[in-house]
Image: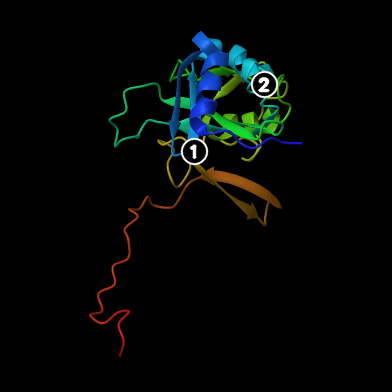
Amino acid sequence: MAEHAIAPEALKDNVAAALGALAQSVAVSRGEVTAIVAAGDYLRAMQTLRDAPACRFELLIDLCGVDYSTYGDGAWQGPRFAVVTHLLSVALNQRVRVRVFCPDDEFPVIPSVEGLWAAANWFEREAFDLYGIVFEGHTDLRRILTDYGFIGHPFRKDFPLSGHVEMRYDAERQRVIYEPVTIEPREVVPRVIREDNYGGLH
């Protein structure tokens, strides 16, 4: 039977004590605990969070990539790519968020946690597909959402909104073909309603 959830500050202290030097920081924001760990300590930190008696995060419930290149209107000075994982302890009724930054912006690589939580398999494939983050040690790292032969990683901030290629069915060839994008790039401008009495009572 699950216990009552402990206060975020107490959970923060438990996580910080369990991770020790493996954590760069452990903080509470908006009632949620976030631990930041270095890429070199990521696997050991994650195993500690799974196995430590005060943590027991037996479930990985989410893992995603983040591209910080335009964060703070481009004022961000840290590494470009991060992996954010959410862990759940059913036994202790508690959750934690773990953030780890990829050391190399040009070739973002982070260890896979698939060996610790099987649920990481598809989440890591999704982050690889959409952000180009490579998960070292993953057993089957390939695209999961985009089509075969897709070029680029569509959740990167520098990926064009129109993409690089378009596909259509060619009746003469009787197959789907891929061609360079033919649509013109456009500015996304919010619609302005100019009626004086718009939304008012008549």
- The residue shown at (53%, 34%) is 7
Label 2 sits on a secondary structure element that is: helix
Q: Residue furthest left?
A: 196
| Mark closer to the observer (1, 2) | 2
**Image coordinates for residue 165, horizontal then vertical, percent:** 52, 43
Secondary-structure class at tag 1: loop
Q: Quadrant of the C terminus?
A: bottom left
Q: Identify the amino acid type marked 1.
A: Phe
Q: Tell me: residue 109, above or below residue 70.
A: above
* Neighbours of disc 1 within 10 Å: few (<14), some (14-19), many (20+): some
Q: Are marks 1 and 2 in contact (CB under 8 Å)?
A: no
Q: Amino acid at mark 2?
A: Arg
According to the picture, the residue beneath numbered tag 2 turns out to be 50
Between disc 1 and disc 2, whose residue precedes?
A: 2
Q: On the image, numbered disc 1 is attached to which residue?
A: 155
Q: CA distance from mark 1 to mark 2?
A: 29 Å
